[in-house]
Image (cartoon, grey):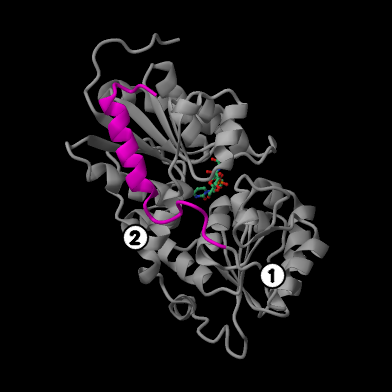
Amino acid sequence: MHKPTSGARAPDSILCVVGARPNFMKMAPIMAALGDLEPKLAVSLVHTGQHYDAAMNHQYFEALGIPQPDTNLEVGSGSHAVQTAEVMRRFEPVLDAKRPSAVLVVGDVNSTLACALVAAKKGIPVIHVEAGLRSFDRAMPEEINRILTDQISDLLFITERSGRENLLREGIADSRIRFVGNVMIDTLRRNLEKAVPVAGILKDACRGTFLDGHDGYAVLTLHRPSNVDDPDTLRTLLETVLKIGARLPVIFPLHPRTRAMIERFGFNKMLDVHELLQLPPIGYLEMLGLMKDARVVLTDSGGIQEETTALGVPCITLRNNTERPITVDEGTNTIAGQDPAKILAAFDEIMRGGGKAGRVPEFWDGQASVRIAASIHEWLKNGLRD
Ligand code: UD1
């Protein structure tokens, strides 16, 4: 076991970490806001390489203007243990070389926890953006990542007020918690005008006439292991989607995990219907274009629950819980789980025009990253005190 790093650290430098697709849209505005601080802060970026396909990765860096990572750990895929351990093993020497004032992690993926853990053990303060979200479902790997990352973080930025209650309940000092809003929505607002129109996406997919004769479309995303790794669950969900497709065409960008499972379980044939358009993983601006004009989005993603709320587009969540309750309480989100009857009832309601109108939650105003940068600046000035 290593002793905590001793000696003086380089002053005022933040090492930011990304690993998987949902981290990229969170990190883009944070790095921009940190870069705008005066006096200048040294900001560097490590990519763990948890996601590595161009479609899951480079496209996002380009579209969102994220600087090229200073280091890519190239860990790739593996079991949770292997992936987490490999990130830790490869992150440690980078941290030793850079000796930043603090490490900033976002979200709840394996890379988030792995890098936070390495930093905490070395006595380097950890900043966690999107802290405090809880699904109260420990079967979700992300829930374990959230709880543990928050426990070892020094400065915790929350997106909604429920985050504070959750953190206080887990014994985290209030003085470490800052309610700043949602950085993902900063990115959404900045890019809305650049969103790629649906017609362009369909044309690129050689399906320019897919929506002809229809009044709108639905978007579907699925990638949670609890939905896609079990053949019975996945079949039930897909059969339900096909019923929806008979009434409203469905556009379905496929996560690599989901594509692999559909192939493994032999479901390709069942999905080969005119009303369902499968796409490869698409870029951020394409997804934004799809969501913004959809009549309904069906998803098991956390981020998409938030983005649809910000866009005012009805969302049906194909999970039994959400760690983002404000999207249900104030936004456009309906939790339907995996039960076909509930999913179809929620869909009927939306088709009748009765979907939730929702309102945009407090501080989801495009300025969360600016608040975060100001708060980090203050915290560094105060010698990293709460
Ligand atoms: C990870 C995150 C999840 C997040 C999701 C967004 C964890 C525990 N999970 O899940 O919270 O919502 O990212 O996408 O960190 N694969 C590729 N190419 C890639 C990346 C993955 O083909 O670039 C395939 C591999 O077969 C891999 C599988 O997808 O085994 C799963 O990837 P992994 O990073 O383990 O988890 P995700 O399901 O993507």
Q: What residue type is labelled 1?
A: Leu
Residue at image coords 32%, 47%? 370
Q: Which residue lies under the disc numbered 2?
A: 63
CA gap, disc 2 and disc 1: 31 Å
Q: Earlier in the sequence, mark 2 or mark 1?
A: 2
Residue furthest bottom as drawn: 213
Mark 2 secondary-structure assignment: helix
Q: Which residue lies furthest to the right in this view?
A: 341
Q: Is residue 201 above or below residue 138?
A: below
Q: Which residue is drawn at 38% across and 28% down?
A: 91
Viewer-proximal residue, 100 or 183?
183
- Tell me: 373 left or right of 348: left
Residue 140 is situated, as x and y percent measured from the top left of the image, at 66, 39
Question: Mark 2 or 1, which is nearer the eye?
Answer: 2
Pick the quarter of the image with the N terminus. Answer: top left
The residue shown at (78%, 68%) is 345
Who's the residue at 47% across and 35% down the image? 112
Q: Quadrant of residue 75?
A: top left
Looking at this view, is 250 or 305 the one in front? 305
Q: Disc 2 vs disc 1: Cβ atoms closer than 8 Å?
A: no
3, above or below 32, in the image: above
- Count residues near mark 2 (Cα–Cα under 10 Å), then give few for <14, some for 14-19, many for 20+: some
Position of 130 compared to 102: left or right? right
Which element type, helix, strand or loop, lies under badge 1? helix
